[in-house]
Amino acid sequence: MPLIDLANPTRFLRLVERLLPWLAGAVTLVIAIGIYQAFFVAPDDYQQGATVKIMFIHVPSAWLSMFGWAVMSIAALGTLVWRHPLADVTAKVAAPIGAAFTFICLATGSLWGRPMWGTYWVWDARLTSVLVLFLMYLGVILVWRTVEDPSRAARAAAILTLVGAINLPIIKFSVDWWNTLHQPASVFRISGPSIHPALLFPLAIMAIGFVLLYVTLLLAAIRTEILRRRLRILQLMQAESATSSRS
Amino acid sequence: MRALAALIARDMRFALRVGGGALVALLFFLTVVTLTPFALGPDLALLARIGPAILWLGALLSSLLALDRLLSVDHDDGSLDLILMAETPLELALAAKAIAHWLTTGLPLVVAAPVLGLFLNLDFSASAAVLLTLLAGTPALTFIGLIGAALTVALRRGGLLLSVLVLPLTIPVLIFGVAASNAAIVGPMPFGAPFTILCALTLISFVVGPFAAAAAIKSGLE
């Protein structure tokens, strides 16, 4: 089956129906292994103690919060260039999922900051740019919730998403310039990760688990949204036939 | 070119005549700056220290307040449809409208800033720094706001949605505007670095703003 066939919503739905149970099983398994590794195998940090366990949730959510915007941007291109309904649906359901991961990142970071920095919130560069990212997710969700006509909302949200994709690196750069006190990136560096391998291994498993979780949630939400749109069209047709038969 | 000049002249005439909104933003700016000492207390040393930040915030909010009129008036009376159908590319026409809007609402804010700086106990060099950074930065606010105005016109929902969508995008302009003003007043950073980045942000907004706004309008009005 060529990949282009998946652009047909019905074929896509059939594939999703077949994939979802397997994906859900894989998510449960990988995250269970990851949590076991994180809590019972990985050592405590010599400075931070047991609070370092928060990292295994915090860091994968932070990665996914950015990955979520990338997914929305690709879907936005699909909306604007090909006018494809599946791209509209993906962009719509990706926004709340991305916002949720961003919120988890903010909340766990805040809980981690309390014992480490002595405060729930500091106006540090990385925290601030994640907060701005969260605000922009909420803005996109708001556009979807303001406009009734789905295809009109899709194009407006797509433009906002792409403007955001251009702006987010600029915001990140300016906020970095504005203030920094957070530790710099310690996993993806040219000289190799500076984090200890005993902590890196469970983190990698949790990251894989979170990506799988994201994909599963996204596919399930796309399926729900396609069904919801079909229901809406059926209701519209029913209402139309009811009014025409009465007149 | 002549069409664009005519569009700019027309928009400026509308903004300055009765029913135009040119002075509302200016009055709002004055009111915000007047309110600040009531919230912070009349401590002149404190006001002098945070004065540039207050002026920048006030200018940001004032220019946001005026954005609603940038496209919605033309949309209501149908002239936006004529602009859309004209030979002049929509991107250029929107850029011309944004320039006219900046000349009638942004520029007065810039000129008023040093006068309001007197209220906030800013000395001459501080006022000059704020004036210069606002002059470089407020066009970016208008051109970023153009995207929000186009989106809300296309969605037929104005007002609050516009502010929520536009404000996060203006954060870099605010950061570098205030940073450059403060650098000129207290240092220790040189004024040049943040100021040139501010100018760069304005130039980027000149490019991104009209194209994104035109795409939004084309998608919304078809």
Image: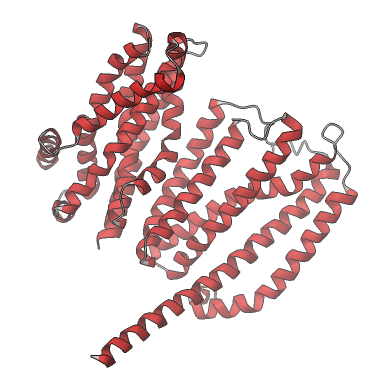
What residue do we see at 13% from left, 54% from top?
Answer: B82
Relative vertical location of residue A216 with respect to residue B198 in this rendering, above or below: below
Quadrant position of residue B29? top left
Left or right: where does residue B73 sit relative to residue B173? left
Q: Position of residue A209 (x, y in %)?
A: 73, 58
Q: Is residue B156 above or below residue B194?
A: below
From the viewer's perspective, is B49 left or right of A212? left
Q: Position of residue A133 (x, y in %)?
A: 53, 44
- Mark count: 0
Residue positioned most to the top: B124
Q: Quadrant of residue B112?
A: top left
- The residue under the point 27% across, 57% down is B218
Residue B110, quarter of the rendered image: top left
> Could you tell me if residue B215 is visible in this image?
no
Residue most toward the bottom? A245
B192 sits to left or right of A96: left
Placement of B53 over or under A79, stated as above or below: above
Looking at the image, which residue is at 81% across and 55% down? A35
Query: Can residue A38 be seen at all in this image of the molecule?
Result: yes
Whole-percent x and y of residue B196?
Answer: 40, 22
Residue depicted at 84% across the width and 31% down the height: A47
Q: Quadrant of the C terminus of chain B?
A: bottom left
Work out which quarter of the rendered image holds the N terminus of chain B and state it: top left
Q: Residue A215, how many percent across, how many down?
A: 63, 63
Who is closer to the viewer here, A183 or A150? A150
Q: How is the image coloured?
A: secondary structure
